[in-house]
Image: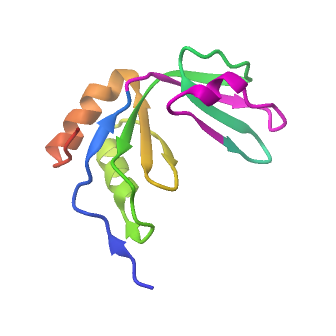
Amino acid sequence: MQKNHAPEHPALSVLRDTFTIYKLSPDASIPEEIRNCDFYNVSKSAEELSVICPEQFEVQSTHSSPDWKCIKVKGPLDFDLTGILAGISDILAQTNISIFAISTFNTDYILVPKQALDEACSVLMQAGYKFE
């Protein structure tokens, strides 16, 4: 099966919340209150449980990283498309903006440090991306 390249520049938006990324032990339970958020993410491996949620929720964790903003790629995206996340992350890497990427069934989300959001949006717009 041949993969299709992504449309030249998918539309982007910035979620309104500021997020914290938490690292918990792999046997920790997911805090019930975050399930009411508009956006949160939980990933589990044998080594850890990662939780990303709006900053107003306090999660007991071994490590945390606060002050992240989230850029959303307008979806849904077809599974045959390639290069969407790579294109965005490459532009941000060239400007030394670190990212934390999340992919879901429908689309991709790119978290950037809150203090780098304006620069991230600016360089993405200079590269032809539009924000809605």
* Residue range corresponding to the magenta coloring: 16-42
- Across and down, in percent, residue 7 comes to 25, 63
Q: Nearer the viewer, residue 55 or 23?
A: 55
Depicted 131 relative to depicted 1: above or below: above
User: Quadrant of the image for the N terminus?
Assistant: bottom left
Horizontal side, residue 123 vs residue 24: left or right: left
Q: Position of residue 125 (x, y in %)?
A: 18, 41
- Is 63 contained in the magenta span? no
Where, by quadrant of the figure, is residue 52 drawn?
top right
Whole-percent x and y of residue 119? 25, 30
Q: Is residue 95 visible?
A: no
Q: In the image, is 99 to the left or to the right of 24? A: left
- Residue drawn where x is 67% and y is 22% of the image: 33
Residue that extends furthest to the bottom in the rendered view of this protein: 1
Q: Is residue 9 left or right of residue 108?
A: left
Asked whether residue 76 appears in the rendered view, the answer is yes
Work out whether residue 8 or residue 31 is closer to the camera in this orientation and state it.
31
Where residue 54 appears, as percent x and y from the top left, is: 52, 22
| Residue 121: quadrant of the picture | top left
Instruction: Using the image, determine if residue 47 lies above or below residue 10.
Output: above
Q: Quadrant of the C terminus?
A: top left
Q: How many marks?
A: 0
Which residue is depicted at the point 63% across and 30% down?
35
Q: Nearer the viewer, residue 78 or 27?
A: 78
35 part of magenta stretch: yes
2 is higher (above) or lower (below) than 49: below
